[in-house]
Amino acid sequence: MNARMSSLMHFLAGDAQADRVVPPTGYTARLTVFAAASMAFLAVFALALSLATGRVADRWGEALAKSLTIRITAPVDQMDAQVLAVMEILATTPGVKNARPLGDDEQRALLEPWFGPDLPLDQLPIPKLIEVVEDGEGFDADGLRARLAGEAPGAILDDHTRWREPLVRAAKRLRALGFVAIVLIAALSGVVITLAASAALAANEQVIRVLRLVGARDRYIAHAFVRRYTLRALGGSSVGTVLGALAIFLMPSTGDQGNFLTGLGFEGWQWLWPLLIPPLAALAAFGATRRTAQTVLQEKR
């Protein structure tokens, strides 16, 4: 443990002579910092999208799972009798927490986005809707359908399964795509840093040759490149993460009623997730630069 800590402290402190091998400025330095900051910024949004999609899907799934609708289609003179029969059935059905017929204003509000605000419900053959909320244990949907078919033929139970299942599948795919995007962002960041390190090594070929002549080993030279580019990636990704988190924090939110766009963000302990992005970016830069340095120095022997 002490040896590892000593190596880490030496890595962070660096070597002034070895650091001269790596140009402190130039396009490769700017490219590394800019790439790390940009990728971290995008990773914050991909992470926020994945988490927000999961939250919205869970909320919608729970709401739809506990709320059902019974649709009653019957002649006007039989509608009240059908509604009364359905309410009596629900009152004696184990697992039903409560049930109530929707009023005309509520049904009009449901249909308003499609038909406008002036829908004449009293002149149109619109089914009557009864909202059913089940308790924690739930009820036997097949048994309730059988009772409705026998005692209220115009009543149809809709348990929202056909709406809930596609929503859950889509949410899971969106969440998976978000994490795939994070992996691709990390891979692209590694590629950019690899190209930058290769360009820096090629530009300093004469310096590397002189260092070898005075006895410097390839491990000593590679360490200088690895340290400089790792710290650049760490610094750039830290800036990108802060900017991304700030942008997420400033986005408007509509609370529990929002969708995954207006509700995009982190909640509670989820704000700790972006803190993992800079060290992971530094780790990716460390691996990419070390591999690149070893390969290029081996080729230039």
Image: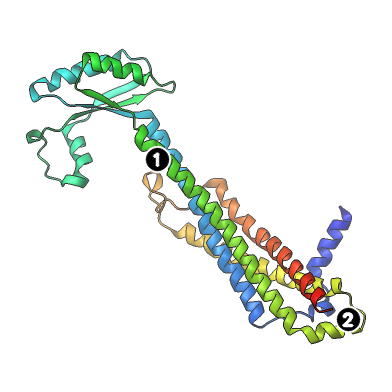
One can see residue 86 in this view = yes
Q: Earlier in the sequence, mark 2 or mark 1?
A: 1
Q: Looking at the picture, how far across and down is residue 149, in whole percent? A: 24, 17
Quadrant containing the C terminus in the rendered view = bottom right
Mark 1 = which residue? 166
Q: Which residue is drawn at 77% across and 75% down?
A: 296
In the structure shown, which secondary structural element does the residue marked by tag 1 occupy? Answer: helix
Relative side of 47 to 195, left or right: left
Q: Looking at the picture, how far across and down is residue 20, in whole percent? A: 79, 81
Q: Looking at the picture, how far across and down is residue 208, in whole percent? A: 82, 82
Q: Which residue is drawn at 45% across and 45% down?
A: 171
* Color encoding of the figure: rainbow
In the structure shown, which secondary structural element does the residue marked by tag 2 occupy? Answer: helix
Relative side of 89 to 258, left or right: left
Count of residue discs: 2
Q: Looking at the picture, how far across and down is residue 246, in whole percent? A: 51, 61
- The amino acid marked with disc number 2 is Arg
Depth check: give the residue in front, 53 or 217. Answer: 217
Look at the picture and state if 279 lies above or below 63.
below
- The amino acid marked with disc number 1 is Pro
Q: In which quarter of the image is residue 147?
A: top left
Q: In which quarter of the image is residue 23?
A: bottom right
Mark 2 = which residue? 212
Relative side of 222 to 282, left or right: right
